[in-house]
Amino acid sequence: MPFRLGGPELIIILAIILLIFGVGRIGKIGGELGKGIKEFRKGLQGDDAKTAEAQDANKKPPEGGAPA
């Protein structure tokens, strides 16, 4: 039997979270979560860029030509 959350259930869960953490702390948690996701994405893009640069370096022929 699948577990499904409807509108009333979500409202109750959000109200409980609001009571536990408070409005100010929820804002801070959301901000920190957003910063974390942003840094994670930057890290992934940085790894992709490094991988692409490494692949390009491997494809380029050595400078100075081939020895005779």
Image (cartoon, rainbow, N blue to C red):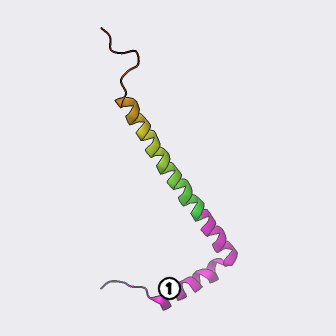
Q: Please state if 31 lies on the left or on the right of 68 as rendered.
A: right
Foreground residue among 55 and 23? 55
Q: What residue is at 53 percent from the left and 84 percent from the top?
A: 13
Q: What residue is at 49 percent from the left and 91 percent from the top?
A: 8
Magenta residues span 4-32
Q: Please state if 68 lies on the left or on the right of 56 as rendered.
A: left
Q: What residue is at 59 percent from the left and 86 percent from the top?
A: 15
Quarter the N terminus occupies: bottom left
Residue topped by disc 1: 10
Structural crowding at the residue carrying mark 1, measured as other residues with C-alpha within 10 Å and reported as few (<14), some (14–19) or many (≥20): few
Q: What residue is at 58 percent from the left and 63 percent from the top?
A: 34
Q: Is residue 68 magenta?
A: no
Residue 42 in the image, given as x and y percentages of width and height = 53, 51
Q: Is residue 8 magenta?
A: yes
Residue lying furthest bottom in this view? Answer: 8
Up the image or down, 25 lies above or below 63; here it is below
Foreground residue among 12 and 52? 52
Up the image or down, 42 lies above or below 66; here it is below
Residue 62 in the image, given as x and y percentages of width and height = 38, 21
**Helix, strand or loop at mark 1:** helix
**Amino acid type at mark 1:** Leu
Foreground residue among 60 and 9? 60
Residue 66 in the image, given as x and y percentages of width and height = 32, 14
Up the image or down, 67 lies above or below 19; here it is above
Quarter the C terminus occupies: top left
Q: Please state if 66 lies on the left or on the right of 63 as rendered.
A: left
Q: Main secondary structure of the magenta part?
A: helix
Residue lying furthest right in this view? Answer: 24
Quarter of image, res 20:
bottom right
